[in-house]
Image (cartoon, helix red, strand yellow):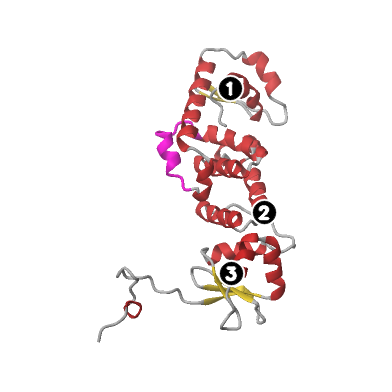
């Protein structure tokens, strides 16, 4: 007896389809009087009661629109299938409620990028603000005050820069530019390296070729400027460094100064500074 495609586990094109994930219940969102069920792509059921549903509707136009499209249910609790996995939804849902949350800590970059994309998609601006604070805490211009081993990596700097560009966050934008400049020096094939860094939807805010070109131009000009002796350190550094945060470290012909070197950056590289 022949079997249908569904019975054989095939999709409409005859390819083997992935088995449906085993359904499990969220340990946090499991209301016995659930008004709606949000189901993650990996099969976790988030049962939301009427009060929580009201918070979701008030906080996200995207989710409100999805609720409106749910047909009259044949079962008691309508189900809305979401494209995100359970780890993302578990973290995202907490930001819909007006309660105090601990400071968001940056983790694995792939996971952070996925959560940022969900915050943006569902218009969870409280979550975007939490990421802005977390990025600035680690990658703002004050990173110069830390030992060099704790300075941002190129990948983290690029992610913070793209985030700042995506959401128009000026203070993070300024600090992440410095982090990107410092972490880029010595990188071979900078454009290819930047292209290989996964930043998800944040990539729409940056032109990798342009960023790589400007970084290389800045690094070249800074080396040339110091090598030619156009900066007189005995007089210039006093105005660029404060006793509290100032420090100078020498790397061959290039001298890196604390965040006060932004003044020099603006005056000497107007045509090559990152946008």
Earlier residue among tags 1 and 3: 3
Image depth: mark 1 or mark 3 in front: 3
**Highlighted range, magenta:** 184-198
The residue shown at (62%, 19%) is 267
Mark linked to residue 270? 1
Q: Nearer the viewer, residue 150 or 64?
A: 64
Mark linked to residue 195? none
Earlier residue among tags 3 and 2: 3
Q: Position of residue 94 (x, y in %)?
A: 66, 64
Q: Is 25 displayed left or right of 22 in the figure?
A: right
Q: Nearer the viewer, residue 269 or 232?
A: 269
Mark linked to residue 125? 2
Mark 3, residue position = 69
Q: Position of residue 159 (x, y in %)?
A: 54, 44
Q: Position of residue 15 (x, y in %)?
A: 31, 68
Which class describes the residues within 10 Å of circle 1: few (<14), some (14-19), or many (20+)? Answer: few
């Amino acid at each position: 007896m022949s079997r249908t495609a569904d019975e054989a586990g095939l999709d409409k094109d005859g390819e083997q389809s992935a088995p449906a994930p085993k359904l499990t219940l969220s340990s946090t969102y499991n209301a016995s009087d659930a008004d709606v069920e949000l189901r993650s792509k990996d099969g976790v059921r988030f049962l939301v009661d009427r009060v929580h549903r009201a918070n979701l509707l008030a906080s996200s136009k995207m989710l409100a629109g999805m609720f409106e499209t749910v047909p009259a249910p044949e079962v008691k609790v309508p189900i809305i299938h979401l494209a995100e996995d359970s780890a993302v939804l578990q973290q995202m849902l907490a930001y819909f409620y007006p309660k105090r949350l601990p400071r968001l800590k940056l983790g694995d970059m792939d996971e952070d990028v996925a959560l940022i994309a969900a915050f943006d998609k569902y218009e969870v601006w409280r979550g975007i603000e939490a990421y802005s604070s977390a990025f600035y805490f680690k990658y703002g211009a004050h990173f110069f005050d830390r030992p060099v081993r704790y300075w941002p990596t190129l990948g983290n700097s690029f992610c913070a820069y793209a985030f700042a560009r995506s959401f128009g966050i000026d203070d993070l934008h300024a600090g992440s530019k410095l982090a990107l400049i410092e972490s880029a020096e010595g990188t071979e094939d900078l454009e290819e390296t930047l292209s290989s860094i996964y930043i998800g939807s944040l990539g729409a805010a940056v032109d990798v070729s342009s960023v790589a070109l400007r970084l290389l131009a800045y690094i070249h000009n800074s080396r040339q400027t110091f090598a030619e002796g156009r900066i007189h350190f005995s007089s210039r550094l006093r105005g660029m460094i404060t006793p509290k945060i100032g420090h100078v470290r020498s790397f061959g012909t290039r001298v890196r100064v604390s965040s006060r070197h932004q003044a020099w950056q603006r005056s000497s590289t107007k045509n090559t500074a990152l946008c």
